[in-house]
Image: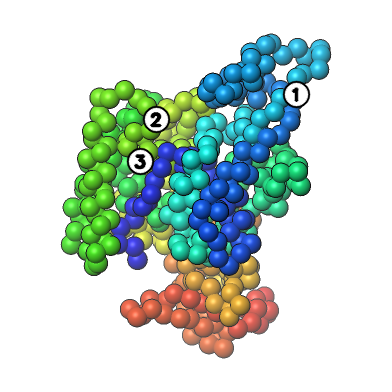
Amino acid sequence: MEFIRVFTNPDRCMQRLGFLKYLARRASQSATNNFSTLGKELINAVSQKVSCTLTPQLQEYIKTALTDSIYKNLRAIASKPLDESSDRPIVQVEIQDVYLADFDIPSRRGKLVKEDWRKYTYLALDMEILRKGTYSLLVRGQSFLSLVQEEERKAFGKSGLIPFNEDSNPFRLTMPQRLLLLFSFIERDGDVLERLYNRLLLLPELFTDREAGDYLPEIYRSIAKESRSKIRSGDDLLRIQKLVDTADKIESWKGKPYSGKGAREVAITPRLEPFVDLGILSKPDPFAYRYQTTDVTKTFFEPFINSESIYHFLHYSFFEAANKAFNLNGENRTDREAILPATQKAYTVLKSPLGYVPILEVALLAGIYSITESGSYFEISQVIDTLKFLQKERPELVRFNVDRWGALTFVKFNNDIMKMMGG
């Protein structure tokens, strides 16, 4: 279990979750990767130039988002009225601009620039999609990539080899993708999110990223204070000190002019913008950093905030909260007929060459399959309990590995459990 559930390297550029699709696909192609290579290839991929017709949505995006002087000529073209009776002009823009211009995505900010190669990849590390050190795909990354369609995987394909497809916008997240990423955010940054959204839910009107960011110093210090008694190593001590130092830096930005690059905005943006993608927060103006909590925010976060622990919420209440928040209308089912088919499917997708899968990962993916494909939901704890009972009845079918404290860590099916049980 994590010492503290706080992102290590939050950054302003961690806005659009769709870039994770590229990173997961690229990392899956090799057992080891280089951090610099991954980051630079991401930037090269998303900044490829493509020629496309100037549409109303692209015109609005150019006028609003591409304000730097290097876009002067492009803005001149976009400033002219579009005539429906004549051919529209062809413009050259980066492929990420085409996707960000889409009317159907809730936030149209988040363009990556050259220097972001050093920063964005840390989001994949913090969410345990990639493994630190080798930068290879972790099992959570395998789960995520399995939920990404082939067209989305190729959305930022190599220049000149794979044409971009506006209809496969990687910034549009399917419900299975949203559920997995939402779980990962809570699991990895839950200590901050619990305290932050407890405060945001009390705000009656629109709030800005600056106003939300002003809560972070108090939040960081409270996490540091509560966690000091749990310090087990020098690394733990360094993480606590980093929280305190960051709180001081954020506080120093109070009252200063808005820059978008201060410590406050750097720390708060990845706690707001991704939740717009996930459908948890509302953003009335897709170009402005102003937000609003909704019934979805309240329905999901209140059970989380009131849960006895983050672990308890994720294992015992996550799918119930998501089912209600997103109006999925799933029926809670705890019988084997509901749990085992989805678990077998998830296991088949994730199993290693030796046949073992982290039990949390197989239970999470099974829960996602069930609620999005079968119209029923169950919790991670219910999957684990079902497998425990099955192992007692049919020990030849299911094997477990445990850690030194006796907690289940890995599971292995010695056969297709559905076929062996006659299902």
Q: Residues within 10 Å of mark 1 (few under 14, many from 20)?
A: few
Residue 162, visible in the rendered structure: yes
- Quote the CA–CA distance across marks 3 and 1: 38 Å
The residue singled out by tag 2 in the image is 260
Q: Position of residue 372 (x, y in %)?
A: 60, 53
Question: Mark 3: which amino acid?
Answer: Ala
Looking at the image, which is closer to me, 167 or 131?
Answer: 131
Q: Position of residue 132 (x, y in %)?
A: 45, 62
Looking at the image, which is closer to me, 199 or 262?
Answer: 262
Q: Residues within 10 Å of mark 3 (few under 14, many from 20)?
A: many
Which residue is drawn at the image coordinates 35% and 46% (left, top)? 193
In the rendered view of the protein, which quadrant contains the C terminus? bottom right
In the rendered view of the protein, which quadrant contains the N terminus? bottom left
Q: How is the image coloured?
A: rainbow
- Quote the CA–CA distance across marks 3 and 2: 11 Å
Looking at the image, which is closer to me, 192 or 342?
Answer: 192
The residue singled out by tag 3 in the image is 267
